[in-house]
Image (cartoon, rainbow, N blue to C red):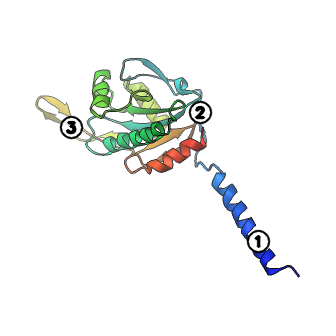
Amino acid sequence: MINFNFQKYLLASFVFLLLLFSGCKSKFELDENLRGFSFKLLDQDGQTVDFPTDFENKVVVVGFVFTHCPDICPLTVNNMQLVQNELTGKGETDDVVFVAISFDPARDTVPLLKKFAALREINEKNFRFLTGDRKITDSLMSTMRIVAVPEDSTIVDGTLSYFFTHTDRISLIDKKGFLRKEYSGSKANTSEIVVDIEKLR
């Protein structure tokens, strides 16, 4: 007959190993290959960026926004900034890049994106804001399953004004160019994103 204490020891050891291996396992809901796609855009400094090719060998945190957004987009950018700050605090940013892509290129020009980044005190070392030709941004959004529908427009002080009903999302792309996970952009758990980034490094 097996000693009762020994049985408890075996059970405790089994539970420990189960927790250990389940905790170390990287579980990601997506595994979509974005390699081969090429979207030529401009960043806030007017530099041409080939997305996602130019970010190979980096973990990419991607958000889709427009600068005239009154609610969801500022929260999305802020959450990306919080993740960036946490990684920077650990001294771990060289292999991670943050990318906010505008789906309103008609208004979100290079100078406006630069101003937007400055107003929000973004650390631009590894944070890029991208804009470009409407056909290219629309194609990129379709590839990433992002929807943005313009609402009724109006004229404010002689300028056309409108907003979008749009997908609220932050996406995570691994170093090999695979889309691995998606989060609610405005309500993201930033600690979860940090943990997932660590798993992909």
**Nearest-to-viewer mark from 1 and 3:** 1
Q: Nearer the viewer, residue 37 or 97?
A: 97
Which quadrant of the figure has residue 7? bottom right
Q: Secondary structure at mark 1?
A: helix
The residue labelled by disc 1 is 9
Q: Residue at x 61, y 50 (%)?
A: 27
Q: Residue at x 60, y 38 (%)?
A: 201
Q: Residue furthest right?
A: 1
Is residue 10 visible in the rendered image? The answer is: yes
Which quadrant of the figure has residue 65? top left
Please provide percent x and percent y for residue 22. 66, 57
Left or right of residue 90: residue 1 = right
Left or right of residue 156: residue 34 = right
The residue labelled by disc 2 is 175
Lower position in the chain sequence, tag 2 or tag 1: 1
Q: Secondary structure at mark 3?
A: loop
Q: Residue furthest top?
A: 47
**Nearest-to-viewer mark from 2 and 3:** 2
Is residue 165 visible in the rendered image? The answer is: no
Circle 1: residue type: Tyr
Circle 3: residue type: Ser
Lower position in the chain sequence, tag 2 or tag 3: 3
Please provide percent x and percent y for residue 137. 41, 29
Q: Nearer the viewer, residue 108 or 123?
A: 123
